Image: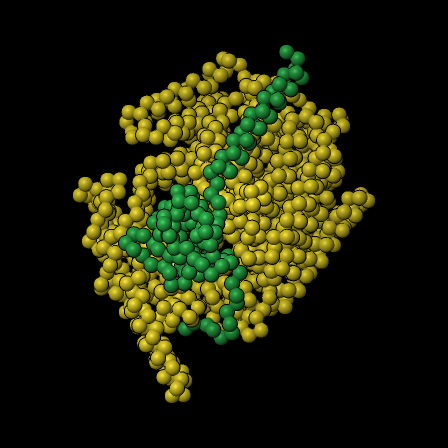
Chain colours: A yellow, B green
Amino acid sequence: MATVGRALLIVAFAVALYGIAASIYGAVRRERAWSDSGRRAVYALAGVLTLAFGLLEAAFLRSDFSFSVVATHSSTTTPAFYKATAAWSSQEGSLLLWVWLLSLWSSLVLVLVGRRVREIAPVATAVLLGLASFFLTLTIFYANPFDTLAIPPAEGVGLNPLLRHPSMMFHPPMLYSGYTLFSIPFAFAIGALITRRLNAEWVLATRRFALGAWLCLGIGIVLGARWSYTELGWGGIWAWDPVENASLMPWLIGTAYIHSIMIQEKRGMLKVWNVSLVLATGTLAILGTFLVRSGILDSIHAFGASTLGVPFLILIGAMVLGSVGLVIARRGDLRSEHQLDSLLSREAVFLLQNVILVALCFVIFWGTFFPLISEAVTGTRASVGPPWFDKYTVPLAFALVALAGIGPLVPWRRMTVAAVRRSFVAPLLLALALLVALLFVSGARADPKALAFLVVVGFTLACVAQELWRGIRARQAVAREPAPVALVALVRRNRRRYGGYIVHAGFAVLLLGVAASTSFQHARDVSLRPGQSVRVDGFDIKYVRAVAKPEAEKISLGAVLDVSKRGRHVTTLRTSRGFYPAQDLSLGIVGRFFNGEAESEVGLRAGLGRDIWTVINPDLGPLQRIIAEGNRRFRSAMLAIQAKGDGSQASIGQLYALRDAAVAAVARRFVTAPWSSQFRFIVSPLATWIWIGAIVTVLGGLIALWPAPLTARRRVTAGYAARVARELARS
Amino acid sequence: MNPSRKRRIRLVVALTVALLLASALVYTSFSAGSDERTAGQLLDSAVAGKTYTLAGTVKQGSVHREGGVLVFRVLDPHRPVSAQVRYTGIVPDPFRAGRGVMVKVRRSGSTFVGEKDTMVTKCPSKFQVAPPSPGSGAST
């Protein structure tokens, strides 16, 4: 099977190369037959890679340890769900996933819009296939997922315990979908620049893909944050780790792009800016992939010690130089048709929002690459931590939330003073009322920065609600519909606009959760014995009893905790730490069951008001003496069996049964003779609103992405066609 | 005012603001950045009171707890020396002997005190691991 897999990769590579040649030839000679052949090569590539990926998945599900990647990332004891996800836990499998998703999205875009942008599509096809052939080169020559072992092992290493989380099924594919979808507007922008078809046609053709990329990457980022919160045992959602930052940077520039293209669509402005943003987004998506794989920056997530850094650097260098060169060469064709009429206009608000997003991205880029920058400048590698990132990102996020409220209220071209008064009085009064309430009712005044943030979030939500209310009233006046029906009809008829407003509201709620849960969080690290209690933010948390659960897959040592407030029971929390057996036999026959990889199971009581979060870190120190004794005795027994020449299955099996009983007995000492364990307790107000905000944002994004009803689409297309005709007449 | 002159003034103002902000960014990153050092470098030249980022591998057999304090030694990748670290705060799940770590520390006599919640442990999942030797499967 591995041979078939390797052959499929080579066929895919050949198909990609053929597609590039056919597309370029078709574009240069303007021969549609060759361009169509290039397009069909993309479909063929998607088919071949689907087979290859299916083959790899089948090898994981069958625990076929003749595949090197299966032996090192799965095992027979790995649950089937995680066997399926283990395919992309490896460098090799994730590269194949990347190129497979790219081929699928490329096929989709060519099916949907290839005929609408006939002149650009062949060049875009060549660019997409160029990216695909780059990744196929890596999978064939550097990290082949179909490499085999001469003698397959009886058992595999297993999936890393930290990756055994339901998010593993969705988080990486969502991130990769985001990255690969951003390659599509990138490729079409290159096509538009090369063919000089720089009207807004390519923007319109790929807009939905840019939005899809933004949505997928956003979902991937949020799933990663949720995973971090519920699995990684530190209680946070974002650590400014280089790999986390690598996913955020293209998302930020992509956000700027999906806003600024509206200015190009409506007014024919910012063409250089838009094309630069989309080229930067595509390049940052590749940079993100590079950061995970090169090992150039220290990250908890990176695939370190790999040899992929140089090929990626060459690709990124080519993308940057090519993009800059093309934009400079075509600057004459990218002139704006209009100038900014007023600083009090939607264009100006979008522009300011774009500048803030780019600044935010630059800050994150600088902080992420600072170890390399400082090494180049001073000769010493230095790094900046979360406080440095927070210093810059918090005020910028503050401004972004405010603009998310202001933007929808400001009309295109210019806004009169009377309109300002009409639009902003109600949201400002509501924000003022919120400020008063927070100052006098809640304890928020203790942190002025957080207080200001909460008020700005309130202002933004009020702005969005006012816009929705105005739309509902307008529909009611015309159609006399009840408010809920009017709301649904309103959103249905202008999905992009109102979907966008819902995204703004969701984003504001998400940041409300982040601000409140980090600013007003109470955290304590304490060492407790069973029976002892600790008070955190008014909650009394009692360590009721220790729990030990020795299983074949892992040994879990944990605690049951009772949470009460003013004597009333609130909840019961269960947290544990799972110890997975190590493959390293030097740790001892018993010791390898306690000193392998470990992962935390968080105890969480989530609520709309606050989350109570805890994790245990059992100290294995008191067990080490018994473990050492167990290692010594079983080693002696093993040697005795060997000395007697009694290596029969029965004797070995008996010894293993005794060992398993001994391991279970050692684990149970955690319950029978308990000692102190280290706990972290966190009480975070409004943390749940992070996830509620994220869900609202995704819903808004899906609404904006969903195709509009045919009549509305015709109206937009007709208006747009008139604009394109005007542009073409001018050029 | 002439519209093109107005645009030029806006551009100059915007570029000046961007330049000032970029300068602040560069200045604060260099002043707030914590130098990344090996155990040997810190033992030779660390100054008390200054924060450094200690990077290296956790020494086998050196990890133990003293109450709520995690004590371990970090090996220098180039020299046969190690620095003892006394750390409180979040211990990442992948932390254990033999694993690459980075932690912000300050010198305190012959040992180094780790700043709370600053420890980063490289995730072994994503590192290239050597394939298991044939037939080395564990039976439980």
Residue A170's place in the image compared with A70, above or below, is above
Query: Residue A279, position in %: x, y?
Result: 64, 39
Q: Residue at x 36, y 28 (%)?
A: A448
Query: Residue B31, position in %: x, y?
Result: 48, 37
Instruction: Give left or right: position of A133 versus A428.
Output: right
Query: Which residue ends up furthest to the front in the rendered image?
Result: B44
Can the viewer see residue A557 in this picture? yes
Residue A386's place in the image compared with A598, above or below, is above
Nearer the observer, A80 or A17: A17
The quadrant holding residue A136 is bottom right
Query: Residue A417, position in %: x, y?
Result: 51, 13
Q: Residue at x 36, y 65 (%)?
A: A594
Query: Residue A299, position in %: x, y?
Result: 49, 50
Quadrant in the picture for the N terminus of chain A: bottom right
Residue A665's place in the image compared with A126, above or below, is below
Q: Residue at x 23, y 46 (%)?
A: A534
Q: Residue at x 49, y 27 (%)?
A: A403
Instruction: Give left or right: position of B131 versus A32.
Output: left
Quadrant in the picture for the C terminus of chain A: top right
The quadrant holding residue A28 is top right
The quadrant holding residue A712 is top right
Nearer the observer, B70 or A133: B70
Query: Which residue ends up furthest to the right in the rendered image?
Result: A29
Can the viewer see residue A725 in this picture? no
Query: Which residue ends up furthest to the bottom in the rendered image?
Result: A644
For the image, the number of numbered tags is: 0
Query: Which residue ends up furthest to the top in the rendered image?
Result: B1
